[in-house]
Image (spheres, grey):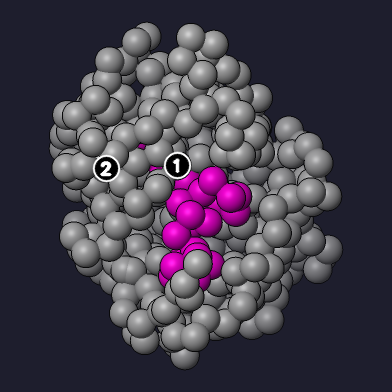
């Protein structure tokens, strides 16, 4: 086999959209339903954490991707902003099959397996904005047989055993989520067109014949967690084991970008924190929260309060903090805002709320920092800290959880976030998009 050559500074990029920016992808628009879906998202993460990934000692090795390539190459893709629809909040447009037809696919750092709805929808396909993929119309489509290595990898990627269609010798997958959403169908292979000139010729994914749950009108999802069947792993041999994104703002944000490749995480603007591997579920992205400040003043909590499992996730909207941390943040933040604005009743899971418009309250919002091990952090502006939960009511965009912390996408918006898996680190840089 010939050597793989990387082109210096070439990028593979996609625009990123939030589903709210596309009314055809947004069947729900009320804010309480955003929060409802966000709670369902939490169930998915808790579900994955509650199920041990068996044989973790035999987890796929990522060391083969940590070798420094001869030259760096990456691909950047438009990333689009939108409303929470269960498995994620942001989507990209990618092409599948030959000839390529394009589909709106959710980006999800919290899952490994990629799938989309497929004809003939033997049991059920939900309504989607794009025509449903027809594998019979693709000259490069292939169903993957039961005895293949890819079929053997399905359990680690989905946490469910595959089974075999005896009639066709086809591997059948089930991707299930903690909110009772699921996709079931044929493990498949086809051409994935990321950009007109960048094609993954043997992309392994699920061709869903029964798809039910909180997927809105997206065609499916692209899994970015650490597993050999994830999109990231499948393109890593060509581009390097890394990706980055900038999630645009909910409020009319533009310019979101998703980039794949080592070059996408090489900017000197990034400050990095170690990427933590949790032995219970090594596919998810963990990091260590070190401190939270409000108005440059650290929260008055026991340092041990920060020693909790902390996930960074593209598909959770509201950042969750363990109750002691959240209570301290709520108190410190509320003490400042309540000097100018009257308190308002809680809205769903948000209980630190005030009467006033987002624009007016933003003028007095204190600086809030999330600091991570090693000095990296998120210096949050008003739009990262507040949400307009109801007309004339704004709330702190954080909520309490029982034990773990989750860094949600509201706090990540407009920052460049780098996942440098080959070097086991996560980076943040300001001013990535709007």
Regarding residue 354, the answer to whether it shows in the image is no
Residue behind mark 1: 204
Looking at the rendered structure, the secondary structure element under dot 2 is strand
Residue closer to the observer: 335 or 33: 33
Residue 97 drawn at (x, y percent): 25, 40
Q: At x 49% / y 22%, what residue is drawn?
A: 170
Residue behind mark 2: 96
Location of residue 121 by image quarter:
top left
Residue 315 drawn at (x, y percent): 46, 46
Residue closer to the observer: 392 or 177: 177
Residue 375 drawn at (x, y percent): 64, 82
For residue 287, the mark is none
Q: From mark 2 to mark 1, how far is it between C-alphas?
A: 11 Å
Q: At x 48% / y 75%, what residue is drawn?
A: 3
Q: At x 55% / y 71%, what residue is drawn?
A: 420
The span picked out in magenta is: 220-243
Could you classify mark 2 by the number of other residues whose Cα lies within 10 Å: few (under 14), some (14-19), or many (20 or more)? many
Looking at the rendered structure, the secondary structure element under dot 1 is strand
């Amino acid at each position: 086999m010939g050597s793989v050559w990387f082109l210096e500074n070439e990028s593979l990029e996609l625009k990123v959209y939030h589903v709210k920016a596309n009314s055809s992808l947004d069947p729900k628009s009320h804010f309480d339903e955003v929060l409802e879906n966000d709670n369902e998202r939490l169930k998915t993460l808790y579900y994955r954490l509650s199920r041990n990934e068996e044989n973790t000692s035999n987890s796929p090795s990522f060391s083969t991707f940590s070798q420094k390539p001869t030259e760096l190459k990456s691909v950047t893709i438009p990333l689009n902003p939108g409303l929470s629809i269960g498995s994620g909040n942001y989507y990209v447009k990618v092409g599948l099959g030959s000839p390529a037809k394009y589909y709106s696919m959710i980006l999800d750092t919290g899952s490994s397996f990629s799938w989309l709805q497929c004809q003939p929808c033997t049991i059920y396909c939900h309504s989607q904005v794009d025509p449903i993929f027809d594998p019979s119309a693709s000259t490069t489509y292939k169903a993957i047989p039961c005895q293949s290595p890819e079929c053997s990898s399905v359990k680690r990627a989905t946490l469910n055993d595959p089974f075999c269609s005896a009639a066709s010798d086809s591997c059948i997958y089930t991707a299930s989520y903690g909110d009772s959403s699921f996709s079931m169908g044929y493990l498949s292979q086809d051409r994935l067109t990321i950009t007109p000139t960048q094609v993954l010729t043997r992309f392994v994914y699920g061709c869903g014949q029964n798809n039910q749950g909180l997927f809105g009108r997206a065609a499916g999802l692209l899994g970015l967690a650490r597993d050999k069947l994830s999109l990231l792993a499948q393109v890593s041999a060509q581009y390097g084991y890394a990706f980055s994104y900038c999630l645009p703002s909910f409020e009319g944000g533009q310019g979101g970008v998703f980039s794949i490749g080592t070059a996408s995480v090489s900017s000197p603007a990034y400050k990095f924190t170690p990427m933590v591997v949790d032995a219970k579920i090594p596919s998810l992205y963990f990091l260590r929260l070190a401190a939270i400040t409000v108005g440059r003043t650290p929260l008055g909590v026991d340092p041990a309060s920060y020693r909790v499992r902390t996930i960074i996730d593209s598909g959770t909207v509201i950042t969750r903090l363990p109750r002691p941390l959240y209570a301290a943040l709520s108190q410190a933040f509320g003490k400042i805002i309540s000097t100018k604005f009257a308190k308002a009743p809680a809205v769903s899971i948000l209980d630190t709320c005030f009467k006033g418009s987002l624009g007016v309250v933003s003028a007095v919002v204190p600086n809030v920092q999330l600091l991570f091990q090693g000095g990296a952090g998120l210096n949050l502006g008003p739009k990262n800290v507040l949400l307009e939960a109801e007309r004339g009511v704004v709330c702190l965009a954080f909520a309490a959880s029982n034990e773990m912390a989750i860094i949600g996408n509201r706090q990540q918006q407009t920052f460049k976030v780098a996942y440098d898996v080959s070097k086991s680190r996560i980076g943040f840089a300001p001013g990535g998009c709007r």
